[in-house]
Image: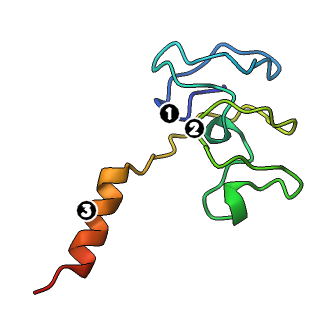
Amino acid sequence: MPGCAHCGRSLDIIANQVGRNDTCPGCDEDLRSCRNCRHFDLSVAKACKEPFAEVPRDKDGANFCELFQLGEGGLHQKDSRDALLSAAESLFRKK
């Protein structure tokens, strides 16, 4: 069952019919985004398992990727800017 990678909600979508402007009814995030694609994987180059994809920088926003296939909706945690800055500050803080 397809689902939203942002909130985990199940989606009633048949045959990968996701338009560029479609949003999740649960969290209002874009559905046709890298994070919702079955090729999305943070452990590979450009976070995409599809070697010929032109991967956009914004993994959360809607895009025009021709290789997009709606994934199963596993939650992909977004790193917030504040959390990243806090981790960097604590790493380099003088003792």
Q: Is residue 17 above or below residue 68?
A: above
Using a 10 Å C-alpha cutoff, classify the residue at mark 3 as few (fewer than 14 neighbours), some (14 to 19) or many (20 or more). few
Q: Position of residue 55 (x, y in %)?
A: 75, 49
The residue wearing badge 2 is 60
**Observer-nearest residue: 24 or 46?**
46
Sequence order check: which comes first, mark 2 or mark 1? 1
Looking at the image, which residue is at 31% across and 61% down? 85
Looking at the image, which residue is at 46% across and 29% down? 7
Question: Could you tell me if the residues under marks 3 and 1 are in contact, i.e. CB atoms within 8 Å?
Answer: no
Looking at the image, which residue is at 61% across and 41% down? 35
Sequence order check: which comes first, mark 2 or mark 3? 2
Q: Give the spatial CA distance, label 2 vs label 1.
A: 9 Å
Q: Amino acid at mark 3?
A: Ser
Q: Give the spatial CA distance, label 2 vs label 3.
A: 22 Å
Sequence order check: which comes first, mark 3 or mark 1? 1
SS category of the residue bearing label 2: loop
Q: Amino acid at mark 1?
A: His
The residue wearing badge 1 is 6
The residue wearing badge 3 is 86
In the rendered view of the protein, which quadrant contains the N terminus? top right
Q: Amino acid at mark 2?
A: Asp
